[in-house]
Amino acid sequence: QVQLVESGGGLVQAGGSLSLSCAASGRGFSSYAMGWFRQAPGKERDFVAAISQNGGNTYYADSVKGRFTISRDNAKNTVYLQMNSLKPEDTAVYYCAADYLGVGTRWPAAYKYWGQGTQVTVSS
């Protein structure tokens, strides 16, 4: 079992950058593929990015490709999401999630463990 806590959200102007972190506690962090998802008010939870257990493979939603970068540090039990060139449509609550022995999928149902979320607001 793993517990996840996101941090780093906030308010930023369009074109700016934010860096999100997700700290995991519990055993076996390196056995989990990790994902970032987001949910805007009144909308479904959408896939943003995912990373494999050892960080060798990364996956992105088309809407963030080239602007966002997912990475992880297994020694620190932390996964990151660097967000650049932010747009107002990136405004949402961002969640990290863990998929035990997963490969990094865009499907939320594959992730058993979720953080509480962190708000990202991009002003125009």
Image (spheres, grey):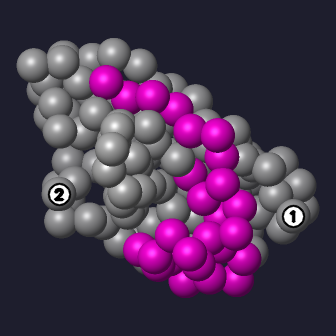
Name the residue: 46% across, 76% down: 107
Q: Choose between 71 and 65: the one closer to the eye.
A: 65
Q: SS for tag 1?
A: loop
Instruction: Indicate the position of residue 77 as horizontal and vertical percent values.
Output: 73, 51
* Residue 111, above or below 75: below
Q: Choose between 116 and 29: the one closer to the eye.
A: 116
- Asked whether residue 114 is in view, the answer is yes
Q: Is 124 on the left or on the right of 42, as rendered? A: left
Name the quadrant of the C terminus.
Answer: top left
Region of the chain picked out in magenta, as a range = 96-121
Q: Is 61 on the left or on the right of 95, as rendered? A: left
Name the residue type under label 2.
Ser
Residue 103 shown in magenta: yes
Q: Is 59 on the left or on the right of 26, as rendered? A: left
Instruction: Indicate the position of residue 30 as horizontal and vertical percent values.
Output: 73, 68
Residue marked by disc 1: 1
Name the residue: 18% across, 65% down: 62
Residue marked by disc 2: 63
* Residue 85, above or below 30: above
Name the quadrant of the N terminus.
Answer: bottom right
Graded by Cα atoms within 10 Å as few (under 14), some (14 to 19) or many (20 or more), the crowding at tag 1 reads few
* Residue 110, above or below 86: below
Residue 87 shown in magenta: no
Residue, far front? 42
Name the residue: 40% across, 49% down: 38
